[in-house]
Amino acid sequence: MIKVALPNKGQLFERTLEMLLACGYRINKSVRDLSTIDHENEVEFFFLRPSDIPLYVANGILDAGITGKDFVAEKGLSPTCLFELNYGQSKLCVAVPAELAIESIAQLRGKRIATSFPNLTARFFPERELLVELEGAVEISVRLGIADAIVDLVETGSTLKQAGLKIVGAPLFESRAALFAHPGREVPEELVTLRNRLEGKVLAQEYMMVEYDCPAEILKSACATTPGIESPTVMSLEKPGWFSVKSMVKRRDAQRIMDDLARQGCRGILLSALDSVRI
């Protein structure tokens, strides 16, 4: 049985729980639960602060964990990243009062910077004595007069706008949720299964299945439009000179491909969502 850390609260917890349940894991958590055992899949899950998960995994206390890449980078630890997930996207940005004529990070040298990520911030603002370390609600620090600017995680930017702040310069760091493992423990069957299930779920959200009937004279061009992963599945229909074709296509291209197939003369074109895949 492997031991895996999960975020204990917030949107990262909600999206991770949703993903794992969709992958067939049995997870029950009440408000006070610190751990739960999925006997069917041979995994014990521990609910921890997202910022603490890198410490437990990197030091081998737990086999693996799901948390944001920003928390791993902030701790300066090196657990093995097994797979990046498609949620928890955010950017570590510098922000200043919107009314100030500041357009570059260089203009903030020597200024007080409030942040919950002092180690990442210090890479760009090395004057550590000017960093104001906070646990949260960083965006209010400028209005309260304890900082001149902030470095904080940004998802949509709406919170910054509400606080009267604007982003300056390019993001300092880009993050998303990922599955990390303790170095040297990447190969247990249960952990490989976890990684494969997560990857299968993410890939299923990127692909769709298209099926259509195709006359023989355009079969080659239609298959070129839907080449699939290895090649499309082609079967003869009872009607002479017609074939049934099935192929995986990128979700972002699916509607365009359907239009293209229809223009070529294909009939009965169907598009289906995928629940999980293995490629």
Image: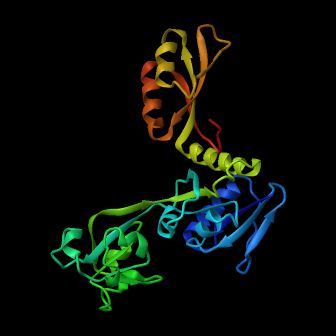
From the viewer's side, name the closer residue of 122 and 48. 122
Above/below status of 233 relative to 236: below
Above-or-below relation of 106 to 164: above
Decide which of 103, 130 is in the foreground and name it.
Answer: 130
Residue 105 x, y percent position in the rendering? 24, 69
Task: Give the side of residue 197 with respect to residue 142, left or right.
Answer: right
Location of residue 28 by image quarter = bottom right
Indicate left or right for 147 with 268 as reference: left
Q: Position of residue 37 (x, y in %)?
A: 80, 65
User: Percent position (x, y) of residue 85?
Assistant: 55, 54
What's the residue at 60%, 56% (across, down)? 179
Q: Is residue 108 left or right of residue 241?
A: left
Image quadrant holding the N terminus, namely: bottom right
Q: How is the image coloured?
A: rainbow
Quadrant of the frame with the C terminus? top right
Q: Quadrant of residue 63?
A: bottom right
Horizontal side, residue 80 vs residue 141: left or right: right
Q: Residue furthest right?
A: 39
Residue 246, image x, y percentages: 60, 26
Q: Is residue 118 above or below residue 194?
A: below
**Residue ID at (58%, 59%):** 79
Number of numbered markers:
0
Camera-side residue of 114 and 96:
114
Q: Residue at x 59, y 13 (%)?
A: 242
